[in-house]
Image (spheres, rainbow, N blue to C red):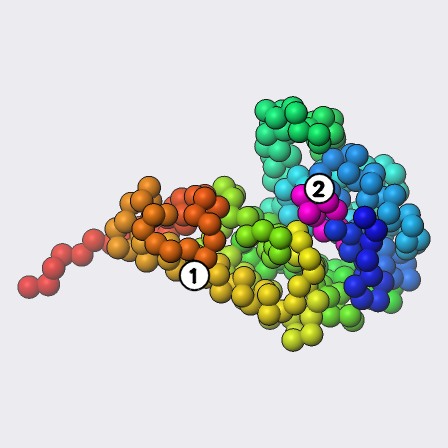
């Protein structure tokens, strides 16, 4: 489970628990850790691998969004390597405690899960350096750019760009090892437009690190954007035809398994403006 260098001083660890990607970006001032995993024990595993890299002192932590698998290691990282700013969007930071509690409730209901006790015992520590649209972390000889391109996987997603090596860390706005997670806090009608903005940050040669799975390229992001747009447009069409939300999944063909889209359809219908009734013209 070592870190792999995908560009100059940019290393990715693909952790087997949840197939999660964690990234180290280093510069002359030290390094940034992007996402911290979902428990104290998992964060310790990540830090053991960070130590093998010897990337210098920790300068900052970045949370790509609020979900527990990206934030619940924050306290462990800070307590081990020292107090530094933890960057996230305002929405993500505000929602981190609630997201962590949802995860803890789920693991409490499945105590047989080998990671359950670890998750339940882990302290929740949200980000303390927030922004609404864009920010950056100064690493001395390079910048790590942080951009909130819009709502998609959650309301508070960010992407982190390393412009000097054309690498973009996409968080869960892009997933490779499974369909995009269109959960009960996702924004399916806005996600395609958000990815359009992400694509504007990419070149044909860009390297993209998804939240889960193997490193991908711009073409993969384009294809995922097309699939998500198909989901959004299908939801819109079904609603305009008057198909009840309870019948929508069975009434169309989808680019992803129907069982993965129950929340997407429900939330998509809720986010659409109400249809206006018109009287027939004489």
Residue beneath the point at 83% across and 38% down: 44
Quick check: marks 2 and 1 in contact, CB under 8 Å?
A: no
Q: Which residue is denoted by mark 2 in the rendering?
A: 17
The quadrant in which residue 113 appears is top right
Q: Kindly identify the residue that appears in the image at 85 percent across and 59 percent down.
A: 26
Q: Earlier in the sequence, mark 2 or mark 1?
A: 2
**Disc 2: CA contacts within 10 A as few (<14), some (14-19) or many (>=20):** few
Task: Find residue 244 and name its label.
Answer: none
Name the image quarter holding residue 259: top left
Residue 91: tell me if it is visible: yes
Label 1 neighbour load within 10 Å: few <14, some 14-19, many 20+: some
- Which mark, residue 230? 1
x, y percent for residue 161: 71, 63
Name the residue rendered at 92%, 50% in the picture.
52
Q: In this view of the protein, which residue sits in the foreground, 66 or 180?
A: 180
Q: Is residue 250 magenta?
A: no
Horizontally, residue 120 falls left or right of residue 280, namely: right
**Secondary structure under the numbered disc 2 in the rendered image:** helix
What is the span of residues highlighted in magenta in the rendered image?
A: 15-23
- Residue at 49%, 51% (x, y): give it: 187
Q: Pick the residue in front: 32 or 46.
A: 46
| Left or right: 164 as drawn, with respect to 264 | right
Residue 17: say if magenta. yes
Q: Position of residue 186 (x, y in %)?
A: 51, 47
Q: Which residue is outermost to the bottom?
A: 204
Left or right, residue 98 beside residue 126: left
Residue 130, percent across and down?
A: 69, 49
**Residue 202 percent across, percent down from the top left:** 65, 70
Q: SS at mark 1?
A: helix
Q: Is residue 239 left or right of residue 262?
A: left
Is residue 201 visible in the rendered image? The answer is: no
Question: Quarter of the image containing the C terminus?
Answer: bottom left
């Amino acid at each position: 489970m070592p870190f792999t260098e995908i560009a100059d001083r940019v290393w990715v660890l693909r952790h087997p628990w949840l197939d999660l990607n964690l990234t180290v970006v280093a510069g002359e001032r030290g390094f940034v850790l992007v996402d911290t995993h979902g428990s104290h024990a998992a964060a310790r595993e990540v830090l053991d691998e960070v130590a093998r890299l010897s990337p210098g002192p920790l300068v900052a932590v970045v949370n790509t969004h609020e979900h527990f698998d990206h934030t619940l290691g924050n306290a462990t990282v800070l307590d081990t390597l020292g107090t530094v700013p933890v960057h996230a969007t305002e929405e993500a930071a505000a929602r981190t405690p609630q997201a962590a509690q949802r995860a803890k409730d789920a693991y409490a209901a499945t105590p047989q899960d080998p990671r359950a006790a670890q998750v339940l015992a882990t302290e929740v520590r949200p980000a303390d350096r927030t922004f609404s649209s864009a920010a950056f972390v100064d690493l001395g000889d390079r910048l790590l750019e942080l951009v909130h391109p819009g709502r998609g996987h959650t309301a508070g997603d960010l992407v982190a760009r390393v412009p000097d090596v054309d690498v973009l860390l996409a968080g869960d706005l892009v997933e490779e090892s499974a369909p995009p997670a269109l959960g009960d806090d996702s924004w399916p009608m806005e996600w395609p437009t958000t990815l359009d903005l992400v694509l504007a940050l990419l070149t044909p040669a860009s390297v993209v690190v998804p939240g889960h799975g193997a490193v991908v390229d711009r073409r993969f992001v384009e294809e995922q954007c097309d699939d998500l747009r198909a989901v959004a447009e299908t939801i819109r069409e079904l609603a305009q035809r008057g198909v009840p939300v309870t019948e929508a999944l069975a009434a169309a063909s989808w680019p992803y398994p129907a069982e993965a889209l129950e929340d997407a359809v429900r939330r998509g219908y809720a986010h659409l403006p109400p249809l206006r009734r018109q009287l027939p013209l004489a």
